[in-house]
Image (cartoon, rainbow, N blue to C red):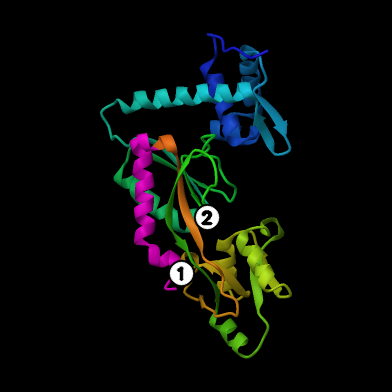
Amino acid sequence: MAAHFRTDLDWDQLRVFAALARHGSLSAAARVLGVNHSTVSRNVAGLEAAIGAPLLVRNANGYDLTEPGRRALDVAMAMERAALALQEQAPHDACAGRVRVTATASLAEVFLLPHLAALQAQHPALDLELIADRRSVSLQRHEADIALRLARPLDGDLLARRACGIGLAFYATQAWHTRIQLGEAPHFVGFDEAAGTLPEALWLTRQYPRARFSFRTNSQAGQAQAAAAGCGIALLPHFLAAGHPALTVLEMPHRPPARELWLLTRADARADARFRLVADALLDLFRRERTLFEGQG
């Protein structure tokens, strides 16, 4: 039987349910809300009892929304939007409120942080949240508002705009340049097994299937540090290598393909001034820094 929402819903239960639906686990939702696991579980169970239907089902990685759960999440999102709209009626900065940006760890922590801090200083009423995560954080489920991704989405109701190209090259210390010139076989710095399916990792192992990987780490920022310390040769984006003066481009037989950075927003986000402000500022930033990201070719 289809579930019907009653008039005595507890709005706080909806808020807790929305956090669990967004973040996918009891521990993550509890951490964001500043409560314990049992509080999250109790509130969601209470909401399910009020609605008369299960809202979430467990899977191997967390939870999936049921059909009543999707309707409940829509209600929770409408509630949050209404609350934000009331806040924005106050006589303050039109771009007030929270904007969540998600990007890969290297892009977020190495490049974006100071620029977003400068943007927030220009708009003190703006609350910025930067999510550094390799996984595809969902915009449709309102886990984030703006996503910077290295691939254009093929489906979904998203607005995708190209930010810039991402050029890559092999980088190494001068000592490794000399060792290669003397005929020594390269030792690579690469991804660990958990990140072995990333496009850069797959390309490197295809081109150099018998090469030694003398150092592995799960982040490109870690790879850049390892290469700068002399651990081996790393395949790095130009913008990341630029922060390590000890690294210079090492010409190798196979030239890595470039990638593209895309800025994604929900189609309805363009109606909100704060989302437009941050998205447009990011696009302007990447256009200004195009040489840093794309290299000199």
Query: Percent position (x, y) of residue 231?
Result: 63, 74
Above or below for 23 versus 69: below
Residue at 68 percent across and 61 percent down: it is 192
Hey, what amino acid is under mark 2?
Answer: Leu
Report if residue 262 lies within the magenta region: no
Residue reaching furthest to the left: 91
Image quadrant occupied by the C terminus: bottom left
Residue reaching furthest to the top: 7
Hey, what amino acid is under mark 1?
Answer: Ala
Residue at 67 percent across and 65 percent down: it is 216
Q: Which residue is mark 2?
A: 150
Answer left or right for 118 relative to 216.
Answer: left
| Mark seen at residue 97 | none
Q: How many marks?
A: 2
**Occupied quadrant, residue 82:** top left
Query: Percent position (x, y) of residue 195?
Result: 66, 57
Looking at the rendering, the stretch of residues picked out in magenta corresponds to 270-297
Dominant SS type (magenta): helix
| Residue 120 visible in image | yes
Residue at 62 percent across and 91 percent down: it is 182
Residue at 65 percent across and 25 percent down: it is 66
Q: Which residue is mark 1?
A: 242
| Residue 126 visible in image | no
